[in-house]
Image: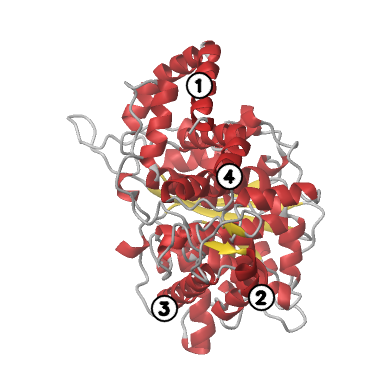
Amino acid sequence: MDCLYTFNLDDYYSIHEIRRPNDTFLSSTKHFATCTAKKVNFSTPILANYNNVPLFNPVNIDANNLCKNLKQIYSSLFDRSYNYSKSQWISYSTLELDKFESIDNLTIHLYEDAILEYKEERSMKDLQLVDFKELELYSFNNYADALKMIINIPSLNNYLNQNVISIITDWPGQLFIRKIITYLKIQQSATNISQDYKNFHPIIGPLHVALNSKETALIINYEFFKQLFHFVFGEKKKLAKKPKPWRINLLLELAHKAWQKIKKIILEKFGPYYEDTEYRMAIDLLDNIIPATLDIYAVLFRSGSYMEYIETIFRIWTFALKWSRKNYNKAPLAFLSDIFYWTDNNHPFNESIKSFLVHFNNYYIENVHSRIRAYTTKYSTTDEIIREAFVIALDITVSTKQLPCRYSTKKIPSLINCDLCDTLLQNQYEAEVLICGHGYHIICYNAMEGRCKYCYDYYETGIKNNVKSFINRLEKEANILTEDDIDIDEDNENENNNNNNNNEDDEVENLNLVLSEKDKIEQEFTDKLVNVLNW
């Protein structure tokens, strides 16, 4: 094995089950652990211990280093919208937008081979199914057992003795694999955990980040997206409280395209220092949250734009902090802490991620699971499923979660005054309202070292509190998933799915109707825009 490999580890459960038993069939969900390996061509193995620099940060997740990078590099970037940063990347030619077509981005969460098999980052070529076994992935011991699927293969065990094996995985994998390594480091010889585990390293899955951030953005701003949904598909159609990923993607894309069309006119109409709460909430959603969550996987990750990807992971963490989003207010911090540690200490694993970013993808395992579901039924036995796996290889009350970041800070926002000197914001050339919603005179903003100090303090506190909580979870707390580890609405994941399925054909028909009435919609859009200009 003379190259780098990336591994996926995830749980699969048969979703063909009849939830209620009937006279002929008793339901019992089957749980499996899936492990895949993907060869990274033109790469070399990465030594875990390189020039006496260990792979695993000696302080685990380094809140101080995160805060240092926040202060020196990122906090001033987060004072502006994601679209502002994106425009800078384009002007400096660091981001290529013409690589991906709109229809390609809209089908990002569909795994059919006919759609995207030819894409490099989704190609199943050189993918190996390491193992597929009946096993739940809910606890420390479950993940220790699952990793033995790799350890018990002699060639991989030899590889693992000196080299890094990265595991791209979801939150439970992030938690328990890091917990295994943490136990090894803090207990040393006193632990009964084998040293075979020491060179595994969990990596946050970009697809998980995209899916979770887009879903949360829609759920928190549900009333806005429900109105958009009804406008496109009709008042009689029902939008599930937790829609399917492709439908979420479609609604966010529709909102994004519409905003691009009217953004210049709206910003010129209201000016740079208009602080009305509803307006700032809309700007934050349309110019910051929606485009960042759409681009993180579909554009930045898939184009291999490493620096832009890291910045946007950090930005999306600020959204998760504001949203009080379980797990995703912690997992990105662990990833970013590792990146900054490897960069500071010249560990080559950082350069590997930078050079081969698109390979650190959790798409592969989602594709495998999609194939298994397609070729099994509710009557498939455990052995049959395993065999198949190997065969296929706004007029509402809102919360602070919806509002711009300033409403989550300790600074009570002013609607007309500078948030530093508390005097009136008047001249657009001397004042600006940031994407967080805080407004400053330019001279006041520069006096704060070119960053919003209230949001910086909020982010810094969020880093320290969540890192402390995560470290405590790794070192001391339960070795099984607890209530605090469960994502929002996870128990109701399939809520309204039946309604979604029944309505899909109707929605396609309705969409065709909308497209056929393009002229009518364009006229209505023009009328609305004229009304805004006449305010």
Per the rendering, the mark at residue 472 is: 3
Element type at marker 4?
helix
Q: Is residue 496 left or right of residue 405?
A: left
Q: Residue at x 34, y 50 (%)?
A: 490
Q: Earlier in the sequence, mark 1 or mark 4?
A: 4
Question: From mark 3 to mark 4, how far is it between C-alphas?
Answer: 34 Å
Per the rendering, the mark at residue 527 is: 1
Where residue 381 appears, x then y in whole percent? 37, 39
- Dot 2: few (<14), some (14–19), or many (≥20) neighbours within 10 Å? many
- Residue 12 to residue 64: above or below: above
- Residue 231 to residue 390: above or below: above
Residue in the foreground of this view, choosing between 151 and 112: 112
Residue depth check, mark 1 versus mark 2: number of the one nearer the observer: 1
Tell me which amino acid carries mark 1: Asp
Q: Earlier in the sequence, mark 3 or mark 4?
A: 4
Report if the CB atoms under discs 1 and 2 are less than 8 Å apart: no
- Residue 256 to residue 429: above or below: above
Tell me which amino acid carries mark 2: Tyr
Where residue 272 appears, x then y in whole percent? 59, 50
Element type at marker 3?
helix
Element type at marker 1?
helix
Q: Earlier in the sequence, mark 1 or mark 3?
A: 3
- Residue 327 visible in the current orientation: no
Residue in the foreground of this view, choosing between 1 and 503: 503
Tell me which amino acid carries mark 3: Asn
Q: Earlier in the sequence, mark 4 or mark 2?
A: 4
Where residue 267 appears, x then y in whole percent? 59, 42
- Residue 141 visible in the current orientation: yes
Tell me which amino acid carries mark 4: Pro
Q: As drawn, which residue projects farthest toward the left?
A: 23
Residue depth check, mark 1 versus mark 3: number of the one nearer the observer: 1
| Residue with the mark numbered 2 | 341
